[in-house]
Image: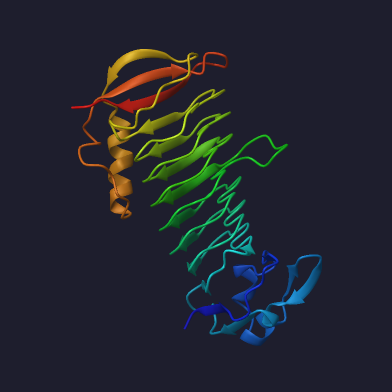
């Protein structure tokens, strides 16, 4: 069986498990993993104090986390290869700065999912918090590669400072998606929020629902109707990954808004028009 870490003692104080690195634990026994030190508030504790550990990652390069891990932070931080599955909810900073591999979450994730990630894929079956794929405060670039797929809703500042890569949210989002965006692509299934693309330099934010009611900022200018071929390719890949794409979105007509004109003005908002 894959290496499985199961929560047996929930904690009101967050646990930070970035010391549990897949590249390291796949060469360790279950007892070795139990002795790994993690952060619990202002003190360090062994993994075994809160988790049961079974199996091994030596053969399949897979790590499975089980339980309601909403208070467990930094799962999969800086992952470079292999697969991490979370069979429940996950806490903040999931997949932050990851470089490769895949993380699949069966529940919801908290804020900063995929913050400043460089590669790989994060697949969240539920909802996500704020700042998906975003830059940390004081940093220069958010996500610079890879994919983040959210099947539910997401909060504010999705893709803040994104440089490359793809973020797709099937549901609704909060405000300021793509704020300070440098490049990359954000796809939104149901709309929501306001002030999207504020300060963006390049890149694309696409709204697939014609009833989203989105109003661009006054620093964007319409360039008319548009049927983007590249978006069809992206949506085809999303569907192959099991992502819910609204009917007719691939061949729909979109209103193209160019901006943000207070910056380079080379970004675009694609807002699907009603049939």
Answer yes or no: is residue 229 visible. Answer: yes
Residue 230, image x, y percentages = 32, 32
Residue furthest to the front in view is 12
Quadrant in which the C terminus appears: top left
The image quarter in which residue 236 lies: top left
The image quarter in which residue 168 lies: top left
- Asked whether, in this view, residue 5 is left or right of residue 193, the answer is right
Residue furthest to the right in view is 43
Residue 48, image x, y percentages = 68, 82
In percent of the image, x 30 and y 35: which residue is there? 209
The image quarter in which residue 125 lies: bottom left
Vertical position of residue 192 compared to residue 72: above or below: above
In percent of the image, x 67 and y 64: which residue is there? 18
Residue 31, image x, y percentages = 66, 87
Q: Nearer the viewer, residue 216 or 142?
A: 216
Q: Nearer the viewer, residue 179 or 130?
A: 130
């Amino acid at each position: 069986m894959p290496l499985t870490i199961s929560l047996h003692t929930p904690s009101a104080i967050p646990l930070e498990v970035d010391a549990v690195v897949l590249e390291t634990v796949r060469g360790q026994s279950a007892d070795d993993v139990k002795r790994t030190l993690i952060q619990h508030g202002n003190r360090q504790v062994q993994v075994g104090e809160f988790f049961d550990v079974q199996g091994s990652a030596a053969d399949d390069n897979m790590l499975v986390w089980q339980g309601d891990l909403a208070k467990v932070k930094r799962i999969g931080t800086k992952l470079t290869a292999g697969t991490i599955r979370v069979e429940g909810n996950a806490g903040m900073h999931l997949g932050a700065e990851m470089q490769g591999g895949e993380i699949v979450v069966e529940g919801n994730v908290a804020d900063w999912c995929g913050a400043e990630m460089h590669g790989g894929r994060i697949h969240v079956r539920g909802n996500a918090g704020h700042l998906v794929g975003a830059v940390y405060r004081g940093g220069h670039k958010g996500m610079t590669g890879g994919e983040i797929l959210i099947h539910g809703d997401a909060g504010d500042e999705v893709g803040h400072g994104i440089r490359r890569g793809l973020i797709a949210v099937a549901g609704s989002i909060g405000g300021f998606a793509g704020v300070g965006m440098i490049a990359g692509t954000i796809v939104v299934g149901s709309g929501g929020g306001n002030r999207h693309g504020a300060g963006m330099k390049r890149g694309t934010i696409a709204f697939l629902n014609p009833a989203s009611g989105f109003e661009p900022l006054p620093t964007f200018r319409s360039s008319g109707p548009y049927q983007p071929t590249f978006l069809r390719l992206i949506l085809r890949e999303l569907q192959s990954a099991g992502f819910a794409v609204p009917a007719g979105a691939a061949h729909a007509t979109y209103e193209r808004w160019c901006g943000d004109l207070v910056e380079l003005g080379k970004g675009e908002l694609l807002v699907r028009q009603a049939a």
